[in-house]
Structure formats: C-alpha cells, structure tokens
Image (cartoon, rainbow, N blue to C red):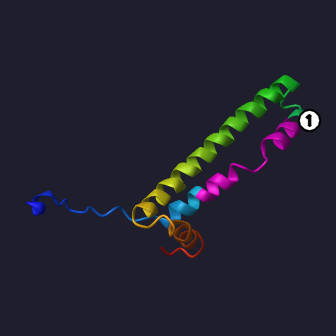
Amino acid sequence: MAKDKIQPITPSPPVSVGRLRLGLIIWVVSYLPITIPLGAWLYATGVLPTTKAESIFVVVTWGIEILIGWIGLFIGGKQILLLARNSKKRQLPGLVWQAIWKGKI
C-alpha cells in the first residue's frame, strides 16, 4: 500500500551560473549613482530647461534604476531558488559563493 503513494522525484532544472552572475551584476549596476550627476550635467548644458524638468528627470531615472535592480534580483534569485531546492539551508551561502566566484556548483 505504501508503494502506491510514492511519487517519482522530478529533477529540478540545472542552475545557470551565467544567469546568477548576470543577475548580480545587473543588481549592482542599479546602485551606481548615475541619476544626480547626469541630471546636473543635462541641466548645466541646457538640455533640461528648468529645475522642475530636472526633478522630473531624477524621479523617472530613479524609477528606471529601481526597475533594473528588481530585474537583476529576479534573474539571480531564480537561480538561487533552484540551488536551495537541492541543498540544505546551511549550505546555501557557500554554494552561492562557489557558483559566483568559481563557476562551480
């Protein structure tokens, strides 16, 4: 009777080290302080005619930076979840570090 209830184990898809690294790089790039210097430069060169236009530019570019960061977290986090399925909780940080630094899992 117990044999009838055993479900076959489906293997999880392989973890992509490249996607993990890409997600990390995208997330880090989203933290680069591009908005304020770019807005000041565009205002100084006359591309943004008023300080209100500069303020709108800053808010919009910050929104874009946040969106880029979330995309990076989604790409990398999906791979970390795949790693978490096949490992113990205490091993996960070491596995993620090995995957990022050495390219091995």
Circle 1: is it few (<14), some (14-19), or many (20+) Cα within 10 Å? few
Residue 19 in the image, given as x and y percentages of width and height = 51, 60
Residue 48 drawn at (x, y percent): 84, 29
In the image shown, does 49 or 9 lie closer to the viewer?
Answer: 9
- Give the magenta range: 24-42
Q: Which residue is mark 1?
A: 44
Which percent across, then down, holds residue 73?
57, 50
**Horizontal relation, residue 32 to residue 10: left or right:** right
Residue lying farthest to the front in this orientation = 1
Residue closer to the observer: 94 or 28:
94
Q: Quadrant of residue 85?
A: bottom left
Residue 29 magenta-drawn?
yes
Quadrant location of residue 1? bottom left
Residue drawn at x 88%, y 38% is 40
Main secondary structure found in the magenta portion: helix
Q: Is residue 46 above or below residue 10?
A: above
57 with respect to 87 (left or right) = right
Residue at left offset 83%, top offset 29%: 54
Q: How many marks?
A: 1
Q: Of the residues shown, which amino acid type is indicated by label 1?
A: Ala
Direction right: furthest residue: 44
User: Under tag 1, what secondary structure?
Assistant: helix
- Whether the magenta-drawn stretch holds residue 27 is answered as yes
User: Residue at image x 78%, y 34%?
Assistant: 58
| Quarter holding residue 23 | bottom right
Direction from residue 81 to residue 7 in the image, left or right: left
55 up-or-down from 34: above or below: above
Q: Position of residue 67 (x, y in %)?
A: 62, 40
Instruction: Say which residue appears at 72% left-offset and 37% top-offset.
Output: 62
